[in-house]
Image (cartoon, rainbow, N blue to C red):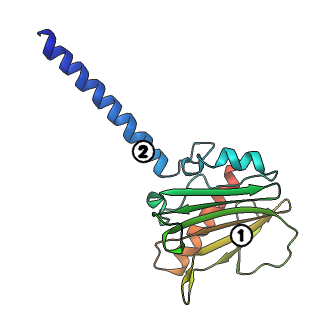
Amino acid sequence: MPAYPKLMATLLACACVLALAHAARASEDAGFTSTASEPALFRRVLPDIKSRTRIPILLPGRLPGTARASEVRHVDGHADAAKYEINLYGGEGLSNATFVGYFAGERTQRDEHFGEPVTLADGKVGYFHARSCGGSCAPSQIEWQRQGVLYSVQLRLDVKAPAEEKRDMVEAANSAILGGPR
């Protein structure tokens, strides 16, 4: 083969390898992976949150399929010594209209809980709040306490049945619990 076609074939092969690597990285950044110690969506904010809080950070390693993880375009996080919050948004504006998810932990001794009791992976009781709509819609939520920290997950889910909504929120909480501190 003359030098020019060989060079072109080599360059084409390199371009294909780079395109595949870029596609794999993009799909990892767009969603959660169950094997990573830091779920891909949180990677940008997690180092700052870890440096600011003293409580264990529990985040799901993956989200249920009905969550809108593929729509996430912005991740925002805040923390201090006694709490952290991470918000996921699916559009240009950071508003209720573009809300995808919320993950929080706060040191508290709150004994009151609202919602339907559910059993979680560690055998503890969590509390599920179904999505509700009035003037605007509140997302599905689940919360649980562990070692003096109240953890909360809120997700905008694409579900049709209440049982599916509850199952998916319990799955997200269990993923965070089983994944352990990040």
Q: Residues within 10 Å of mark 1 (few under 14, many from 20)?
A: many
Residue 174 vs residue 9, the one in the foreground: 9
Within 10 Å of the Cα at label 2, are there few (<14), some (14-19), or many (20+) other Cα atoms? few
**Residue lying at 56% horizontally and 56% vertically, measured from the top left:** 75
Q: Amino acid at mark 2?
A: Ala
Q: Nearer the viewer, residue 37 or 55?
A: 55
Residue 28, percent across and down?
A: 47, 45
Q: Which residue is mark 2?
A: 26
Residue visible at 45% across and 63% down in the picture: 92
- For label 2, the SS is helix
SS assignment at label 1: strand
Q: Residue furthest bottom?
A: 134
Q: Is residue 80 above or below residue 29?
A: below
Residue 9 place in picture, x, y as percent: 19, 21
Which of the two discs, 1 and 2, sits closer to the camera?
A: 2
- Residue under label 1, please give it: 143
- Which residue is pictured at 74% across the width and 56% down the height? 79
**In which quadrant of the rendered view does residue 144 lie?**
bottom right
Residue at the extreme left of the image, as rendered:
2
Q: Quadrant of the N terminus?
A: top left
Q: In the drawing, what numbered circle is on residue 115?
A: none
Q: Are marks 1 and 2 in contact (CB under 8 Å)?
A: no
